[in-house]
Image: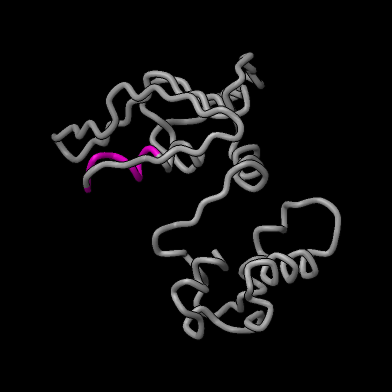
Amino acid sequence: MSKPRQQRGKTRRASSAVIDIRNITKTYQMGQLELRVLKGITLKVHRGEFISIMGPSGSGKSTLMNILGALDQPSSGEYYLDGEDVSRLSEEQLARVRNKKIGFVFQNFNLLKRTSALRQVELPMIYAQGGNRTQKARAALESVGLGQRLDHLPGELSGGQQQRVA
């Protein structure tokens, strides 16, 4: 992450938006070169809305998604997720937010090569409370038609099956 997290407690903002970003910028320093990837992005996404982020290669889509997914911080601007200032969250709080509120299917799926489909789904549930992780993971895979592939490794699954595991 590009700057240290500020530990000033939780700040909430009243907003009907689930995602509320204001004037977000992202700059990368590459030696003497300063690369400005995001320039003043403002966006609100309300509960139940579906949006699409589109643009040519190199336009900042992945950078924006990494910020929205709490995987990276903006260089400047404000980001509120469910009314909570993301810049004020500790690493532990961010991990919980990513586990409870954010779902990502990466372009390359990021599956562990030597881990079964069942364990891939079960692993992020370490932070979830209650219930049997294995049972929940099994039910999730069955719900997407992978009940017969629980013990298969990523290399034994088709691209579409890998995407459903992710």
Colour scheme in use: one colour
Q: Which residues are magenta?
A: 57-64
Relative to residue 29, is residue 99 drawn left or right?
right
Q: Position of residue 81 (x, y in %)?
A: 58, 29
Q: Nearer the viewer, residue 133 or 30?
A: 133
Relative to residue 107, is residue 58 drawn left or right?
left
Look at 54% across and 34% down and name the residue there: 49
Q: Quadrant of the N terminus?
A: top left
Q: In the orientation shown, which residue stands out farthest toward the right?
A: 131
Q: Nearer the viewer, residue 91 or 112?
A: 112
Q: Nearer the viewer, residue 10 or 3?
A: 10
Look at 63% across and 41% down and name the residue there: 101
Q: Position of residue 51 (x, y in %)?
A: 45, 37
Q: Position of residue 94 (x, y in %)?
A: 60, 39
Look at 73% across and 71% down and name the residue there: 138
Q: Position of residue 54 (x, y in %)?
A: 31, 42
Q: In the orientation shown, which residue stands out farthest toward the left?
A: 32
Whether 162 is drawn above or below 57: the answer is below
Look at 29% across and 30% down and name the residue there: 38
Count of numbered circles in the view: 0
Using the rendered view, name the quadrant where residue 9 is placed.
top right
Q: Quadrant of the C terminus?
A: bottom right
Relative to residue 23, is residue 139 drawn left or right?
right
For residue 155: magenta? Answer: no
Using the rendered view, name the quadrant where residue 32 is placed.
top left
Relative to residue 147, is residue 87 drawn left or right?
left
For residue 59: magenta? Answer: yes
